[in-house]
Amino acid sequence: MAITLRSRREIELMRKAGAVVSDVLLKLKEIAEPGMTTARLDSIALQMTADAGAEALFKGVRNPSARYPFPGAICASINEQVVHGIPSEDTKLSNGDILSIDFGVRLNGYCADSAITTAIGEISESRRRLMEVTEHVLEIAIEKSAPAVKWSQVAAEMQQYAESAGFSVVKDYVGHGIGRKMHEEPRVPNFVSDELVANDIVLAEGMVLAIEPMINSGTSAVRTLQNGWTVVTRDGKPSAHFEHTIVISSNGCEILTVKGNK
């Protein structure tokens, strides 16, 4: 497994890409409201991406299981949709929904990727708690990531927190390395498995990771809809998704997908 350690110059370029991602997600979170279509959110993301001189990472990505490339700049996944929800003029947000928005760009040859889950109008306490727990799972990973730390130790704490709160960790989809391409080595699971223990990742300065826990209210089992893209929970219960691109630094890690890092 070849993991690329990024130079300071490369990290600064990824930081600039991360700032674009952050700006777009903050804007979409601000304007997402009942009655708005997910296609409208997508068009705004595309315009902001173009204005920044960047390229939307997801648009046009191919999947052997789907009949067509991914059509959106964002993944817009509502309620029981875990990831890869397709933006559509036919999909309007409703009061009480939770919306996961996953978004990435390439700028000057380097990528950044992030995701948020946001409340649409007034949501139930159970859905709010799901969002809070999922975001905290990501915060645990960020807090624990540092040079010489084994990823299995981080993943164990992420999984333990989510499961102790009564939720389940999606195991079919994991985080990833990121750099010149959206998906690079290593695969970064949010749970511990025999495979991870046998092939553990030792974090090192300059390693750039997109960490993205997906947490379900019910079972961890998921399935893919007939469109070949959208992943939903098998039991129809809600799911939440948070993600940041981070770089391992000399004494911990730094988030690259935050506003103000231009």
Image (spheres, rainbow, N blue to C red):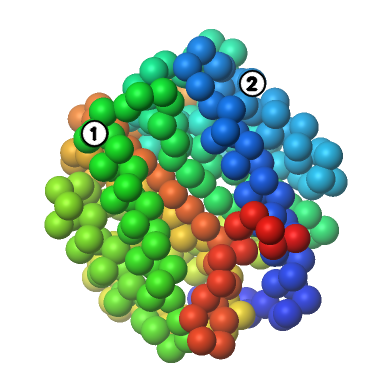
Q: Is residue 81 visible?
A: yes
Residue displayed at 29% across by 51% down:
133
Q: Secondary structure at mark 2?
A: helix
**Location of mark 1 (residue):** 125
Q: Quick one: quadrant of the C terminus?
A: bottom right
Residue 74: image quadrant is top right
Residues at circles 2 and 1 in contact by the CB criterion of under 8 Å = no
> Which amino acid, by three-letter code, is at mark 1?
Glu
* Residue 125 drawn above or below residue 157: above
Residue displayed at 33% across by 58% down:
137
Q: Judge from the rendering whether residue 124 lies leftward or rightward of residue 14; answer left or right.
A: left
Mark-to-mark CA distance, 2 and 1: 27 Å
Image coords of residue 67 (percent x, y): 56, 26
Q: Secondary structure at mark 1?
A: helix
Q: Judge from the rendering whether residue 68 lies leftward or rightward of residue 187; answer left or right.
A: right
Residue displayed at 51% across by 46% down:
115
N-term-proximal mark, 2 vs 1: 2
Q: Judge from the rendering whether residue 147 lies leftward or rightward of residue 12; answer left or right.
A: left
Q: Tell me, for residue 23, which label it has, or none.
A: none
Image coords of residue 22 (percent x, y): 63, 49
Residue 96: image quadrant is top left
Image coords of residue 118 (percent x, y): 44, 36
- Counting other residues with Cα less than 10 Å from the Cα at mark 1, is it few (<14), some (14-19), or many (20 or more)? few
* Residue 121 drawn above or below residue 132: above
Image coords of residue 163 (percent x, y): 18, 55
- Counting other residues with Cα less than 10 Å from the Cα at mark 2, is it few (<14), some (14-19), or many (20 or more)? some
| Pick the front one: 63 or 49 | 49
**Location of mark 2 (residue):** 40
Q: Is residue 111 visible?
A: no
> Which amino acid, by three-letter code, is at mark 2?
Arg
| Pick the front one: 148 or 198 | 148
Residue displayed at 76% across by 40% down:
49
